[in-house]
Image (cartoon, rainbow, N blue to C red):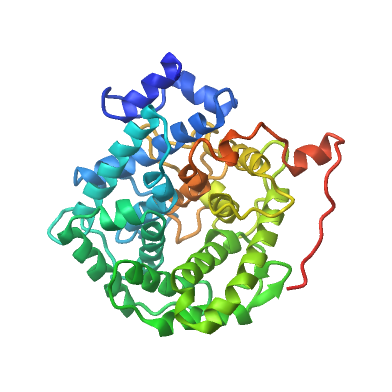
Amino acid sequence: MLSAMNRRVFLEAAGAMPALVLPRTAAAAVREGGLPDRTSWIQLLERIASPVLINLAEGRLREMMPIEQAEGADRAKVTHLEAVGRLLNGIAPWLDATGLTADEARLQARFRTLAQNGLRHGLDRSSRDALNFSNESQPLVDAAFLGQAILRAPHTLGDGLDASTRSRLVEALLSTRQISPGFNNWLLFSAMVEAALKSLGAPWDRMRVDYAIRQHEQWYKGDGVYGDGPAFHWDYYNSFVVQPMLLDVLDSCGESITAWKELAPKAHERARRYGAILERLVSPDGSFPAIGRSIAYRCGAFHLLAQLALRRELPEEVSPAQARAALGAVIRRTLTAPETFDANGWLRIGLAGHQPGIGERYISTGSLYLCATAFLPLGLAPSEPFWASPPEPFTAQRVWSGQAFPIDHAIQN
C-alpha cells in the first residue's frame, strides 16, 4: 500500500488533484533516498514528463515551454521536437509495461493518453504545436529519438495511435530523408528513422540502415567503444546514441540481411562491455566524470546501462540490483539538486543543479530531456529482479568501502 504522501503524488499525477509537481516533502525524500526505489523513480519521471506532455496534449507546448540556450543561439525552431522525442524515448517502455500496481497503472493510463493526444497535436500541421521535422538539420536527430520510442512502445505509440495520427507520423518521418546526416553518429539517426518506418509497416530504405551499420563497424576502436565517426572522443556518445541505437536498429532490421544478423552478437558483446564500464564510472555518491560534450544531458549519460537492464542483458559482473543502485544514485545526483527545475517545473541547463555555462550552442531546454533515458528500466514489471532483488552496493561502493569486488577485464572483440 502507498503511504498517504505517496498516494497524494500518484493522485495528483493521475489528474484527481490539481498539483503536478512533487510536494516539497516528497521531493526531499526522493533526494535522500527515503522512498522505495521504484516509487522514487516514478515520482521523478512524473515530474520531468508532466510539463512537456500535458502542454503538448493541450496544444500549448510552444506557448508554455521556455527556451534556455547559449547566448546568441537560436533553437526555437527545433527545441520542441527535442523535448518530445527525447522524453518519449525514455518513458516509452513504461507506457507499454504490464504487471503494475493499481496506482501505478492509473498513472500510466493517464500518461498514455497524454502521449497519444500530444502526438495528435504535434503531427497535425494545422496545430499551433505542429512539430518541425524537416526545417534545419536537428529534426533528424529527434525524429530518430521519437522513432526509437516507437520501437520501445509499439502498442502505445504505434498501434495505439488513431489512423490519421499514425499516417501523419509516417509522413513526418519520411520528411527527414531530405536531411543529410553527418559522417559520425548521425548516420544512426537516419537508420533509426528507417527502423521506425519498418515497424509502422511503411516502406523503408535498407541502404540507409546498411550504411550506418557498416560504418560503425569500421569505426569500432576496441574494448567496447566505437568512434564518433573516424575519430575517438572522450565523451558519453557511445551511451547517449551509438550503442543504444545500434542495438535497436539491429533488433528491428537485423533479420533482413545476413551480414546484419551475423554482426548482432558482436554488437551485443560490445554493449555489455561498455555497460560494465559505465557501471564502474559511478562514484559512491552517484557522481561521475564530467567529461566531453553534452554533459547537460545529465543521467542520460547512462542510457546504455539502462537499456541493458531493460533488455535483461546486463554484463555478467553487474547484477540487476547493482544496476538499480548505480542508476538510482546517478538519477538522484543529477535530478534532485536545487535549481534543477525552474518555478514551473521545466528542466534547466546543468549537470548538478543550474549551470548554464555547460550548455553548448546546440543545447536548449528541449535537449535536456534526454535524461529520461535513464528511466528505461521502469518498463520492467515490479516483480522483475531489477526491482524485486534485495539492495546491493554497486562496484564503486564496494571498492571504496573496502569490500571485495571483481577485477576488470578488456574484451578482445
**Residue 344's spot in the image, x, y percent?**
34, 34
- The extreme top residue here reads 4
Q: Quadrant of the C terminus?
A: bottom right
**Residue 247's spot in the image, x, y percent?**
53, 66
**Residue at the (83%, 44%) spot, across then down:** 405
Relative to 382, is 295 above or below?
Answer: below
**Residue at the (41%, 61%) spot, across then down:** 148
Q: Nearest the camera: 252 or 89?
A: 252
Relative to 364, is 179 above or below?
Answer: below
Residue 116 visible in the shown view: yes
- In the rendered structure, the answer to whether residue 196 lies left or right of residue 284 reads left
**Residue 230's spot in the image, x, y percent?**
62, 80
Q: Quadrant of the N terminus?
A: top left
- In the rendered structure, the answer to whether residue 300 lies left or right of residue 136 reads right
- In the rendered structure, the answer to whether residue 273 lies left or right of residue 80 reads right
**Residue at the (34%, 52%) spot, across then down:** 84
- The extreme left residue here reads 126
Relative to 321, is 309 above or below?
Answer: below
**Residue 152's spot in the image, x, y percent?**
41, 56
Residue 349 visible in the shown view: no
Instruction: Report the label total.
Output: 0
**Residue at the (68%, 45%) spot, across then down:** 319
